[in-house]
Amino acid sequence: MKRVYNFSAGPAVLPEAVLEQAAAEMLNYNDTGMSVMEMSHRSKAYEAIILEAEANLRKLMNIPDNYKVLFLQGGGHLQFSMVPLNLMKNKVADYIVTGVWAKKALAEAKRYGDARKIASSEDKMFSYIPDCDDLNISQDADYVYICENNTIYGTKFHKLPNTKGKDLVCDMSSCILSEPVDVSKYALIFAGAQKNIGPAGTTIVIIRDDLITDDFLPFTPLMLQYKINADNGSMYNTPPTYGIYICGLVFKWLLDLGGLEKMKTINVEKAKLLYDYLDGSKLFKGSVAKKDRSLMNVTFGTGNPELDDLFVKEAKAQGFDNLKGHRSVGAMRASIYNAMPKAGVVALVEFMQQFEKVHG
Ligand SMILES: *Cc1c(COP(=O)(O)O)cnc(C)c1O
């Protein structure tokens, strides 16, 4: 069967070149006579894989030397817990709630301290990013928390909040590596790999090294301490070895492509194709405030749930898969991560034009 254009929000499309390389190396990686899956994480061959993956991520994101890179497990959700357990030293933290993921992170932090909601866009179904230039930041806040790209709604912070000197913690799960970022503006960045990097099961944490201390909340389980993971090069226990290998192939693919500046140019082109069409369409409408639109997750609908369902069904039959919006918001969402080729977006827009001709 032919491959489809997969617009899934995650786990999501991966670069075909990466899948082909993984397939070619499946039975015998680099003359080791075994698959990466079968390899000891303590072997020389595997050590080279994880060290190269880290080095290439550092190069791609221009990560300063005073930041550690960790390859962990547990997805975004475990970071909702690890962040407060390790960083809430004063037991106060400020959360900006721009969607369900930030809301869940806030609820988890409340289990460990005084986690405060200092801004929210829930009044309009999370369809915009609130103004964060002059927020009521708590004086004793250990950090300010954001979810930079809101996967479900299709919004993104295009400007970081003014944290008034407090450390910024960021869930970057669905926009990491989509464009260059200044890592030094963040105290901690985390991302589940399954959106824009690799397979589910690997979580990347980029953390400023002064935050890696023994001063976590006293009941923090060993494996949830950043320190034990950092001190052991993400190998205190068995890391998600195969997932990290695929992430490493994706990092190489991005470097070969020309890095994140180039990736951003392509992502802007792809998103513009869709948004320009939506802005001119009489049938389809974009779902969120224009100034806050995401480059990665494009949400739209016709306003008629039955017609939306028909669109999703007909699109699927034509090889455009996973266009249904998140179950909490409905309508449609096209996730156009790094690995979605421009041809996929061009073809989707053509299909939408045809659909509009018939149903508009
Ligand atoms: C998908 C997603 C999550 C949840 O990730 P899990 O790995 O399933 O725990 C959290 N935050 C964002 C921004 C996401 O897109």
Image (cartoon, rainbow, N blue to C red):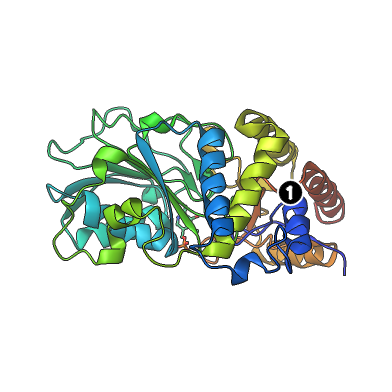
Front residue of this view, candidates 36 and 260: 36
Residue 34 lies in quadrant: bottom right
Which residue is drawn at the image coordinates 84% and 48% (left, top)?
A: 347
Which residue is drawn at the image coordinates 66% and 40% (left, top)?
A: 254
Q: Secondary structure at mark 1?
A: loop
> Position of 181 compared to 114: left or right?
right
> Position of 224 compared to 321: left or right?
left
Question: Where's residue 76, x and y in %?
Answer: 43, 58
Other residues around mark 1 within 10 Å, as few (<14) / some (14–19) / many (≥20) = some
Above or below residue 121? Residue 308 is: below
> Position of 308 compared to 170: left or right?
right
Front residue of this view, candidates 225 and 110: 225
- Under mark 1, the amino acid is Leu
Front residue of this view, candidates 22 and 267: 22
Q: Is residue 337 visible?
A: no
Residue 104 lies in quadrant: bottom left
Front residue of this view, candidates 11 and 26: 26
Which residue is drawn at the image coordinates 36% and 57% (left, top)?
A: 79
Question: Where's residue 89, x and y in %?
Answer: 15, 48
Question: Where's residue 164, x and y in %?
Answer: 24, 28
Above or below residue 343? Residue 201 is: below
Q: Is residue 27 visible?
A: yes
The residue tagged 1 is 283
Question: Where's residue 267, x and y in %?
Answer: 67, 37
